[in-house]
Image: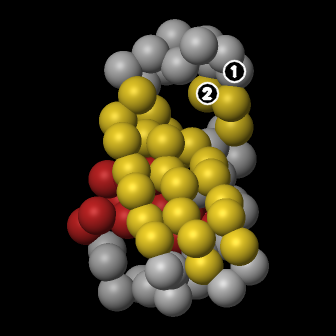
Amino acid sequence: MSDFYNERKVKKTRKDHRCFGCREKLPKGSTAFYITGIGDDGFGSYHLCIPCKEWIDHNPGEAGDEWGEGDVGDARRE
């Protein structure tokens, strides 16, 4: 469980990133979500592409706070 959670929509990324949810490349200039938080493992941050963020929002009970890298993309393809 996260002790702190923050998200913000980034209208245009300034450099290339990789989506934590599906591992797809987010090229410079992409719209994405930037997520930060503090949990059991300490501070963390990552980017999510729009399809992964929408899937998480529409399927909140699927895994709770226990998503690993690439898990959302795998779940979206099922």
Residue 26: assigned label: 2
Instruction: Please report whichever mark, 2 or 1, sits nearer to the chain's N-terminal start.
Output: 1
The correct choice, above or below, for 59 with respect to 29 in the image is below
The correct choice, above or below, for 55 with respect to 34 in the image is below
Q: Quadrant of residue 43?
A: bottom right
| Residues tagged 2 and 1 counted as in contact (Cβ below 8 A) | yes
Residue drawn at point x = 66 percent, y = 60 percent? 44
Residue 16: assigned label: 1
Residue drawn at point x = 34 percent, y = 86 percent? 61
Q: Residue 3, percent across and down?
A: 48, 80
**Residue type marked 1:** Asp
Q: Secondary structure at mark 1?
A: loop
Q: Residue 74, percent across and down?
A: 62, 65
Q: Secondary structure at mark 2?
A: strand
Residue 42 or residue 35, whichever sits in front: 42
Q: Residue 32, percent across and down?
A: 45, 33
Query: Which color scheme did the rendering employ for the protein?
Result: secondary structure
Residue 78 showing in the rendered view: no
State how many labels appear: 2
Residue drawn at point x = 60 percent, y = 79 percent? 39
Real-space Cα separation, disc 2 to disc 1, in angstroms: 6 Å
Task: Name the outermost residue toward the left.
Answer: 58
Left or right of residue 66: residue 69:
right
Q: Residue 41, percent across and down?
A: 74, 79
Residue drawn at point x = 69 percent, y = 37 percent? 18
Left or right of residue 55: residue 70:
right
Residue 37 or residue 28, whichever sits in front: 37
**Residue type marked 2:** Leu
